[in-house]
Amino acid sequence: MTQFVAPRRRGTPGAPQPSRRPKRGGLLGRGGLLTALGLVPVLAVVAVLALQVRETVQAPAVGDGSCGLEDSGRAVFLLDLRKPLADRHAELPVRLLRDVTRELAANTELSVYALADYAEAPRMLLGRLCKSYDSADLALDTAKDQPAHLRGCDDLPAQIPPAMRDGAMRFCAEREALAGRLRTLAGTRPGGPVANSYLVEAFEDTARDFERHAGPRTLYVFSDMMQHAEWFSHLDVAWSAWDFDRFDALRAGRALAGEAVGMGAGVKAVVFYLARKDVTELPRQREAHRRFWEAYFADAQLAFLPQAAVLDYAGERLMDVPTEAELVARERERMRYERTELERMRAELERSERALAEEREGVAEDRERWRRRESELRREQERVREREAELAQERERLAARNVGRPVLGDGAIVVGDAGGS
């Protein structure tokens, strides 16, 4: 809870303060009186701000109880007031709160939350209302002053029973107190870029609450539906990359987030949709955004109700997503690398081609040398065969000359004249 702490006095803590004697002519004197009168407007402003802040952050003093019935319906109105509304649309959340309460069935418990600043506790309870009557009960045939469909707790016909009148009036008073909190919260939002918007985390908390109830369950959302967290942000990611499968993988990988919970098949979800300037106010971006959330609310009955308000704001950068300039620089670097690599590969190919050509020339030379060597071997073989033929002829000639000559005891042939002395 936010508290206002009085500033410490200068000096040593616990040291006695010097006494100040009042001047003559009164306890304050002329100077003290002027000072006190000057502080009155300042103190009044501080008191008003203190009441506003206390009203914003404290639990509601009225409308805190549930309907107390096991089979009562449950409804949640989640307001994303993290983003600034233009002054002309400042009453839109209050008007939608009245519309929502008008269509609630009897014995429906409505919890109104605003998005908080913490992912671990993404919702801040502003109030809880129990509607004990049905708006159709106010549509009496005898009440002819206004059309029945316009009647609410602030437009009660005179013919309704006293108990119903008292319950409707009490409900209306609690609702208007809650509307005051909405106005205060919307008016005290700090300026500057939007720091976060934990929509998915708030949806998961709501889904866990709904799982504990079997009766009718309805979720009303007032938001531009721009999730803005460190693990996924519609603000940091280009609209063309709003891919639900990638988002689902990131959601499953969140540290300490627990198991992802989705809206059940029996839940009705109504989104009072606000466009973001220059983004989802454009048709293609808005269609991509709608398809993303349709995939998220896959099992629930989802209805988008576009509102006239267009939000114009900037967001703090949370995700490590490259900007368009960084993407262009990366693309240029990639092209430079590919060009360098292509030149290197081309030079390597040219070197390989030269080496291959040189190897081919060497093989051709070796082939020619082997061909010449083979020719020489054939010629050598031819000369050997010719020499062998010549030797054979010589042996035949010698054999013919030695025919009829005496042979010695050892078998040798006598050469020359056998009868000489």
Image (cartoon, helix red, strand yellow):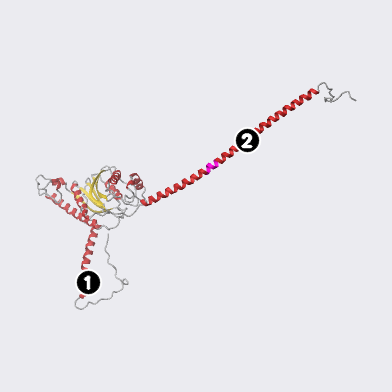
> Could one spot residue 320 in this view of the protein?
no
Choose top left, top right, bottom left or bottom right for residue 386: top right
What amino acid type should be assigned to the residue bearing mark 2?
A: Trp
* Residue at the image position 67 percent from the left and 31 percent from the top: 379
The residue that mark 2 highlights is 370
What stretch of residues is rendered in magenta?
Answer: 351-356
Mark 1 — residue?
Answer: 35
Amino acid type of the residue that numbered disc 1 sits on in the rendered structure: Thr
**SS assignment at label 2:** helix
Mark 1 neighbour density, 10 Å: few (under 14) some (14–19) many (20 or more): few
Label at residue 137: none
Question: Foreground: 302 or 4?
Answer: 302
Tell me the mark number nearer the camera, choosing from 1 and 2.
2
Q: Quadrant of the C terminus?
A: top right
Q: Is residue 294 above or below residue 119?
A: above
Q: Which image quarter is the N terminus in?
A: bottom left
**From the viewer's perspective, is 30 left or right of 235?**
left
Circles 1 and 2, Cβ within 8 Å, touching? The answer is no
Residue 311 as seen in the image, left or right of residue 420:
left
| Left-right relation of 393 to 153 | right
Within 10 Å of disc 2 (Cα), the crowding (few <14, some 14-19, many 20+) is few
Q: Which secondary structure lies at badge 1? A: helix
How many numbered marks does the figure carry? 2
What kind of secondary structure does the magenta stretch mostly adopt?
helix
Residue at (62% x, 34% y) in the render:
371
Residue nearer the viewer, 181 or 345: 345
